[in-house]
Amino acid sequence: MSLTTRFRPTRFAPVLAAALALSAGPAAAQEAAQTQAAAAPSAEKILQRAHEASGGPAAAKHENRVQKGTFSVPAQGLSGSFTTYSAPPNHFLNVIELAMMGQMKQGYDGETAWASDAMQGPRVLSGDELDNLLAEQQFDSDLGKVFPNSETLGSETFDGHDCWKVSLGMASGNDAIGWFDKETGLLRGMERTMKSPMGELPVRITIGEYETMHGMKVPTKTTMAVAGMQQVMTVDEVMVNVKDMPSFAPPAEVQALMKDQE
Amino acid sequence: MRPSRSPAPRLLAAALAALSASALLGCEALKRPAETVTEAPPPDGGVQLESFEQAWRRIDETYPYPDFKGLDWAAVRDELRPRAAEARTAAELRPVLQEMIDRLGESHFAIIPAGAYDRFEELKEKVQEAGDSDSEEAEGHDEGLLGTSPFGDLGLELRVVDGEAVVFRVEPGAPADLGGVHPGWVLERIGGLETAELLEAAETAEAEGDHMARYAAQFAMAGALLGRPGTKIELSFRHGGDGRAEIELTRREPVGTVFGFGNFPETLVTFHEEVLPGTKIGYIRFNTFMFPVAGPFTEAVTRFVAQEVDGVIVDLRGNPGGIGGMVMGMAGHFVSEPGRSLGEMKMRTAELRFVANPRADFQRFDGPVVVLIDELSASTSEVFAAGMKDAASARVIGTTSAGMALPSIIESLPNGDRIQFATADLTAPDGRRLEGLGVEPHEEVPLTREALLAGRDPAVDAAVAWIHAQR
């Protein structure tokens, strides 16, 4: 979704028709939107508040984190589990276990971002897919770093919460829209376009629940709408400063691919 | 990791999007609701109407063409809703739902009854009605020898050749082989079921506009041969000399992996690979694109590369499809250039490409590749064949594929039934739509009874000849 959502032509169409006789319609609506935006805090402040509300400063002191949970696609009878291992500054290993499919893995060790699963085979990630992935793997959870080109759009209710709506702009130009709870400061939802070699997929993320774990506000129930399907993620456990973390390095099948590409 | 927004959702979304966007293409055998399946939950008019509304709404939300290609989808709902409101059971609602999806006129839309995954009990019941010996009262039946799997089979594969059900393959050592059945024989009767009658009805239905009737008939015959291991079935053949043979065969334990994925019914996944005798040509055959095939496929190609074979044949005849995303990893065994398109998928909200993900050298075969297809190759098989034609310059041999290639998902309805609906349209890398048209082979090589009786497979012969000509 782009910045043009501020003006929402379809909503203003009936007003525009009336404007032929009452010419203040669209101009007045635009003025109202601008007034609303003017009263809102800056995107920088909203993101900073989100960082603090989620326990970001404390989280940044962790040596590493492990997050475990489950996911499901209820309408299709699919379910599985996931484990995410992460370490500063942006290293991670994500392991998804899908019933009857085995593991889907994705990781970054500081040099190579990779993925491997039974469906797509092993891959070395690059381009927009890599940019998005690395930009989001900020261990210190500072959204301001991830989205340095952000702008407050105004107020909007999202999933029943009164929120600030923010246009989130990445340095790479891959943008998103975020909704931040006015009361708690926490992120309530996001819409963005996921980019990969397969193309672009719109995703809508709704964070339904938060729990406090290790001084952090962890989104424990998240719903994603992707390609016409709802996926539900539940975080069950978060551990910090774990010993014996797995390697983030590419697995053998990816390393073989990398060797060929040298 | 940001505590306020874990990377896991996005990473998971990316991974699951690839899976769900590619979705599952196939299983046309599920298209028609059965009449004799187990009933759904207790009757409740409210549940049936709710099921109707959900089915209509999901299609309204996801059909890839917002204008429904000129069909007034809202009017379809208004017209059929009163009948749906009168339904008190899932069985009463099914014809209404079927009529609704039939208005779309496309494949990969189906109503799957709540009991349909016990389809072999359904088929058994039908065959029993026709006088088949596959019953507890059958002479020679030994309860203690019966297996529990519904996938017991005979090692026998059929095709329709010149309007007749002909034995295409007989697996060495399987019950059909041990019973003396030979490729090229005409299967005239399965228990009490006359195959000619079934095929004639399918031809009539095709002529009247049901372009999937012949396809469904072939899979119905294949299904009728399956049953619990240890059970018997009587088959009537017309053999090579036009004489006849009545043979009673006993189904064996299934050979393969029984695999279920989400709302899709369990299926028996089989995989076969070899270097063709007398040649240096690798041959791979599997019956569906499901995850148990991925590992063996990689191992087979890796072995062929090590053995420096002259060519590879991937036989997708009779393969009705499966998980569409698998083509990306599998085509990567034959494509060296990253990002080569295998086809495009147009959804309501996005357009995605299936792209080949090249493997490492030791797992990638860069020589001549042939893909075999026939009229029963559908869905993901068609995506793979069309994609390989372009991305790997593969030679496609056989007969035009089924033309049923819409990505779809299966969801549960409140009344216990399930609905399969297509969420995207597919085009080959050259932009040609696959639905309704299929993949045309470079070489049209149909099966003939003469060739089968002589122990030959004309399409494989043509593939071997082409590979040798490339040397």
Image (cartoon, coloured by chain):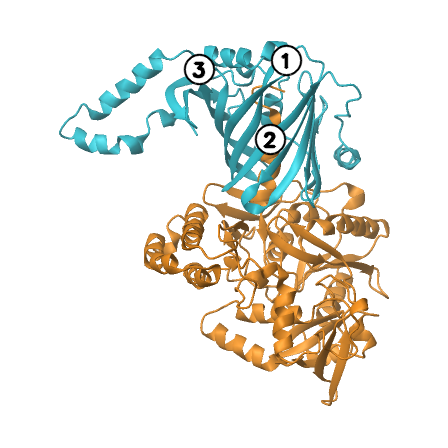
Chain colours: A cyan, B orange
Asked whether, in this view, residue B307 is left or right of residue A94, the answer is: right
Residue denoted by label 3: A183
Distance from label 2 to label 1 (Cα)? Answer: 20 Å
Marks 2/1 same chain: yes
Letter of the chain that mark 1 sits on in the rendering: A
Quick one: B263 or B2, which is closer to the camera?
Answer: B263
Q: Position of residue B317 (x, y in %)?
A: 67, 64
- Which residue type carries mark 3? Glu
Which circle, 1 or 3, is nearer the viewer? 3
Label 1 or label 3, whichever comes before in sequence order: 1
Residue type marked 1: Ala
Which one is earlier in the sequence, the residue at label 2 or at label 1? Answer: 1
Please say if A83 is above or below A150: below
Q: Nearer the viewer, residue B353 or B12?
A: B12
Question: Residue A64's x, y, as percent?
Answer: 71, 17
Viewer-side label of 2, 1: 2
Task: Say which of B438 and A202 sits in front.
Answer: A202
Say which residue label 1 marks: A59
Q: Residue at x 18, y 29 (%)?
A: A19
Residues B135 and B450: in front is B135
Chain under label 2? A
Task: Measure the C-alpha gap from mark 2 to mark 3.
Answer: 23 Å
* Residue placed under numbered mark 2 in the picture: A234
- Residue B458 lies, in percent from the top left, at 72, 72
